[in-house]
Amino acid sequence: MRIVLASLVFLLLSGLHAADETAAVLKGLVKNARGGDQEALAPLRDLHAQKLAGDAVLSLVGDKRVGLGMKLRLAEIVAEWPAGEGRKALMDWLTKHPACDDDALMFFSGAHLTETRSFFWNLLTQVRGPLSAAKEPERIALAARALGAFLDNPDPVVTRVAALLDPANAHVMRACAAEALGGMRSAVALQSLLPYLNDEAIGDAVHASLFQLTGQDFVDDPEKWKAWITAQGSKMPWKMLPRSDYAEFLKLQKLLKPLEEDPAMNMASFYGLEIRGKGALFVLDVSGSMSADDRISKLKGQMSNLLTALQNKSANLRYGILTFGDSVDSCFSARGMALNDEKNHKQAVQFVDRIQAAGGTPMCEAFNHALTRILPEGNIDTLVFLSDGQPSDGTPAMVLDLAQRIHTQFKVRIHCISIGEETLPGSTEPSLLKQIADACGGTFTVPP
């Protein structure tokens, strides 16, 4: 009897010791993660059976000091968790907090937990009336994104997500729907994407999703797509490829197919970058260093040429110009974005004429201005960011995090143009602007 009792006491003490060790590991993990160390999250992979692990994740997701990049990495780790106490703790929290903030919703939409399917379906169907009138389009978009992780969605779910593609809807809903449909093994998804092959705002996302579903690429020719689909009949060879495969496919295509024309000769371009989309915001560095090598004059010339080219484009296009240097200034004041008409053209020309190089490089302030004052109502699909240096009001990591938030929350692709950009001394990482473009679905350009 004594031996049995001793064994039980030993097991109890061992369990308590193990629990204490786990708690200590998680405490250190949370502390280091708050300091920006993503590698500190590694132990979470093996702690999925612990409720404490779920609690630690929630503490980081709810912490405003933790960057979005860290929270997205947490979602990737949790997506690999099997069923257990960790996942249960997350779901119990979500059940009690259905009106959670955007960061928490972004985390759960990326965690791909099967238990969240009904939650996100309810969120997607709560809109009464036309989807174009949705008061919280970002949350509807995140619901679509979350459901896109499940390839076996029934037709009513696919149809509801496909309805978000309508051009009358906010861009963030359309872009997330176009991406989500690429993860749904459904003829409804395939057919719903085809009408938007040539859409200037979501066409690229549509191409990627069609490639995910089929492994085929007929570029923007709907007739070829229809002919191929008809030829498959009821024996559609679904591929269900990861989205990263499409990026690799494009890289190979560029190597095999030379450019048909020099993009720098395209008069609708900006420093050789062809501007595509229905709503573009230009965020331009006009700090004192831009006075070197006549950079500011070249910037004004490029912007003036673009404004001239826009006069031959649709009046339904929208654009905005935000400069940062001595201060952050918007061409169209509080509105931020304006229609491409003659009145706004004159205002933009006058704004560009007044640009002068002065002050520091407040990148964080510029991105924050765009994030809080322009993007929520701006319906923007493209952001062009130009700079020649490092931020003067924060760290490069802070700037990258703000850019990722814009890209993830509003599905805005961010193109970056580097004008003599300097990298930090001794750094072996890509330049800040290159990192932003790579992380935010854009292109990185260094003009000659």
Image (cartoon, rainbow, N blue to C red):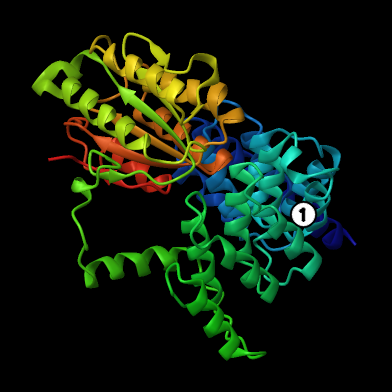
Image coords of residue 388 (percent x, y) = 22, 27
**What residue is shown with label 1?**
116
> For the point 53% across and 27% down, which residue is it?
371
Q: Quadrant of the C terminus?
A: top left
> For the point 51% across and 63% down, which residue is it?
197
Q: Quadrant of the N terminus?
A: bottom right
Q: Visible in this render: residue 362? A: no
**Residue in front for this viewpoint, 145 or 86:** 145
| Picture layout, residue 373 above or below residue 382 | above
**Residue in front for this viewpoint, 105 or 207:** 207
**Residue in front for this viewpoint, 316 or 375:** 316
| Picture layout, residue 296 above or below residue 178 | above
- Disc 1 element: helix
Residue type (three-letter) at the residue carrying disc 1:
Thr
Image coords of residue 259 (percent x, y) = 21, 62
Quadrant of residue 382 within the rendered picture: top left
